[in-house]
Image: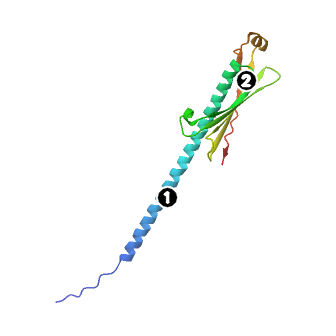
Amino acid sequence: MMRVHDPPVQRRGAVLIAVIVCLSIIMLVLAAIASRTLLVRRQLRQEHALQQAELLCVFGLQVAERKLAENESYSGEVRQVTPKELGGESAGKISIIVERDEGHAVTIRASATYPLEEQMETNCVRVKQLIQKNPVAASRRGEASDRQSTATKIEESNAQEN
């Protein structure tokens, strides 16, 4: 007896649609992972820039204190810091302003910008107030070492400019 075979059912289209759906899902997952990676990388760069700007501010205060100890008439400076000095790829800038009031207080304001000439610059400002213990004796002896750090005010403004 002869058997009649039914022709095979064509299901190639259904398999193709299933493969396309699977590939689409995989692409969406990979796109989400790539997006998240870029976001984390941007945040790490921003955090690094903030830390570097804060370190530059602290360095600016230390430079100002040292120069005030050497020369009481020191009024500040603007200093460019090269990438080589920072051990990185970007340069920074430190602005130091020394203000004196009518009393015995000296206020040092150090502001730093890092990285320079890039899209996302980070700024930091630190202020330190020094009060001279005995200004007459210090000026008579020519010593600035009688200065004592009595108050430290910290102002942080972490502005990001595009």
Query: Is residue 101 left or right of 11 when viewed as pictured?
Result: right
Give the percent coordinates (x, y) of residue 24. Answer: 45, 65
**What residue does disc 1 label?**
31
Picture quarter with the N terminus: bottom left
Q: In this image, 91 relative to 153: left or right?
A: left
Q: Is residue 104 above or below residue 32?
A: above
Which comes sooner in the sequence, label 1 or label 2? 1
Q: Quadrant of residue 140?
A: top right
Q: As drawn, which residue projects farthest toward the right?
A: 102
The foreground one among 36 and 89 is 89
10 Å crowding of disc 1: few (<14), some (14-19), many (20+): few
Closer-to-camera residue (110/13): 110
Query: Tag 2: residue type?
Result: Tyr
Question: Which residue shows up at 54% across the image and 40% down it?
Answer: 89
Depth check: 50 or 29 in front? 50
**What residue is shown with label 2?**
74
Check disc 1 and report its element: helix, strand or loop: helix
Residue drawn at point x = 61 percent, y = 39 percent: 50
- Residue 121 drawn at (x, y percent): 64, 43
